[in-house]
Amino acid sequence: MVTNTLMNYTTGREDLQHWLVSEDGFRPEWLGKGESVFSLGNGYMGLRSVTEEHYANETRNLFVAGTFNKFAENEVTELPNAADLLWMEFKLDGVRFDLTQGNILSYRRTLNLKEAELVRKITWQSPNGNVYDLTFRRFVSMDNLHVIAQRVTITPKQNSVLSLTSGINGQTTNSGVQHFLEGNKTTTESGIDFVFHSVHRFYRRESMNPTSIIKMDRRQIFFDYSDIEIPANEVFTIEKYSTVFTSRDHEVTVDSTEELADLALDVTRKIESEGYDYLLDRHVQAWDELVWSRTPITIKSKDMFDQLAIRFAQYHLAVMTPKHDNRMNIGAKGLSGEGYKGHTFWDTEIFILPYYTYTNPTIARSLLEYRYLSLPGAHRKAKENGYEGAMFPWESAWLDDGEVTPIWGAADIVTGEATKIWSGFIEQHITSDVAFAAWQYYHVTGDQEFMDNYGYELLIDTAKFWASRLEWNETYDRYEINQVVGPDEYKEHVNNNAFTNYTAHWNIQKAIEYVELLRIEKPNLFQQLNEKLDLETAETRFRHVLDLIYLPQVREDGVLPQDDTYLQKQIIDLSKYKNQENVGSMFYDYNLEQVNEIQVSKQADVMILMYLLEDLFSADVKRANWEYYEPKTLHDSSLSLSTHSVLASDLGNRELAYSLFRRASEIDLGPNMKTSDAGIHAASLGGIWQAVVNGFGGVRMTSGNLRISPMLPEAWDELTFSINWKGETLDIYASHDKVVLTRRAPSTEPLTVEIYGEKQTITDTFTSEVLSV
């Protein structure tokens, strides 16, 4: 682990205290950390934060959500790396501006989370001895989703001459794969047109127009500006405004690429006339309205890194989420890097969606509608595997793609051959994860229209898959689910994974309940879905299998078997790997086949089951399973630490919960300068919010009811946050001695909330003293 970190989290002052993430120093071998952590975006597009000038180890990425392409038949669908719009090269007095040359006299790069603007300030001495102050500013507009704005100021300490090259570089690839045709910027297979524009403005004392030559190269168009004279200590300003449009944009109604280009050009001219400061003001206002005023979280802590960490999580959740279009979802790296190819996993439903369900139900619903719209792909996957109903892909891209998980992965340390990735074939719990997320959304929001139009169908269609997936075991007279991968991906081809079996049983049980409800309370909708899903036949099957599904039972010591064989596998000393500096270090010593035979887990498996379906297990059983499985869990997945933090809060171990929360917060923000090279960890950021609100804040929806039982760690004095419940906003304040719940809008309808195990009826504000918890 590289711990000589450049990161600095204490630079914020006054109104910006605990809002700034800074990097003090420049190291070319550590570029990936800043590129990911400082990445900008608005859900429509994501811009990896490379520098304007080029360096050898950089990864220049611009992704537009939902624009997938497949380079060749044997390739996997992925988000194409669009174009490099940030590109600017400077020559100062004949010397290329390059931080690997000359001397860096001062350097700081800062992401202002509150205003979502990235600022880099440098004092550089070139190899010829001349000194320059340079400031680089940029943002990706939250007000106008198509806009990127840059401002560069150069102040030489001596009379100087500047030459500048700046434009659009379409030579970018996805690690060597070029997804665009020559000429017009159109994806090779999916046929999506991309349109880019960039325009420049220059100021010294006033607006000016330096001499320029426009040039074109293969997949490049750029300006060369030369011989720009800048007097000593005078500020020279360059502004660059860029726009991005595609033929897939929902709000764009044009008939041709030419019309799209004309529309984009008009927008570019408009934003250029408005200027950087005006655009930034609109952008900051949009961030405040959509994020910071809507979902404020305040932590009064002995270490205010905690406040910064939750704001960092909320920032990236806003940057990565395509709230504008229900045909799109969230990638495992958001829009910050090429990792996982922009694909959607269970990360959305289990780790990210709760944030939106409790804070912005409109966005949560859009993400769930994506799953509904992707039912054709889920049906095709089920049919191809010999099943019925909706079998959701482990990795999703296009709505109708079906499964897009790569088949081959990293080299086996023993054989040297590529390791087969089985998740796309047999990690099937994703189907019940989608059903659970839809159910949770409905009970938190009360969105009946969603259930009528999408939710009932999702829950029943997924149950049809599970009913067809079950296998009859004549020896034990029961249905089983065999040959799967559960959440613990270090155990492949296992039988009766507890998480899979229990959630499949839950899915079928809910389907029965909803078929009954539809028949009695919504006969017209029942008839529509009966014609579509054959509810009567499905219900008969559901009732037949429900009580015959094998659910692993807890042993006398309270431990629930993770699968049929986990508890019989070899036990080894895992301390070396529990204390590892780099995740996955066990694979320096063992291959996956060997790890499969050891009692070791990648991430929460049984424990996440006890988090999601918590009513099924007593506190004593949860504690027994924690004590058994956590020592065997390496947390090699970024999804694991936050789940364990919430469970530690549930078990009353505040300090362990806090330690796990801090470790989760440091996956991207910590001292390891290599963990984020492929992009930020999207699910972990959603998990950090859950650790704060569901864990320390004690918020939980159980059986359709709201429960709030805050459990603050000793390091925190106060926690204040807001949630949405059944269409209204609740403001919650918690300290070590009291809890205050306030209904933001007056209501004549009483609200029932369970607070520390006691049901309370609240009309406006309720204060509860914290007793012994």
Image (cartoon, rainbow, N blue to C red):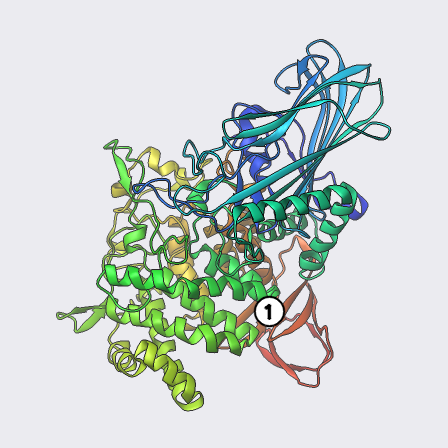
Residue sitting at the far right: 205
Regarding residue 391, the answer to whether it shows in the image is no
Label count reads 1
**356 over 50 or under it: above or below:** below
Q: Is residue 369 left or right of residue 31?
A: left
Dot 1 falls on a residue whose secondary structure is loop
Q: Position of residue 288 (x, y in %)?
A: 72, 56
Q: Position of residue 39 (x, y in %)?
A: 59, 41
Q: Name the residue at 60% across, 63% down.
A: 711
Crowding near pointer 1: few (<14 within 10 Å), some, many (20+)?
A: many
Q: Name the residue at 66% across, 27% down.
A: 25
Residue carrying label 1: 709
Q: Position of residue 76 (x, y in %)?
A: 35, 44
Q: Nearer the viewer, residue 462 or 242?
A: 242
- Give amino acid for label 1: Ser
Q: Name the residue at 58% across, 66% down.
A: 362
Q: Position of residue 746 (x, y in %)?
A: 74, 79
Q: Nearer the viewer, residue 735 or 457?
A: 457
Q: Name the residue at 45% across, 44% down.
A: 79
| Quadrant position of residue 519 | bottom left
Q: Is residue 478 left or right of residue 531?
A: left
**2 over 545 or under it: above or below:** above
**541 over 772 or under it: above or below:** below
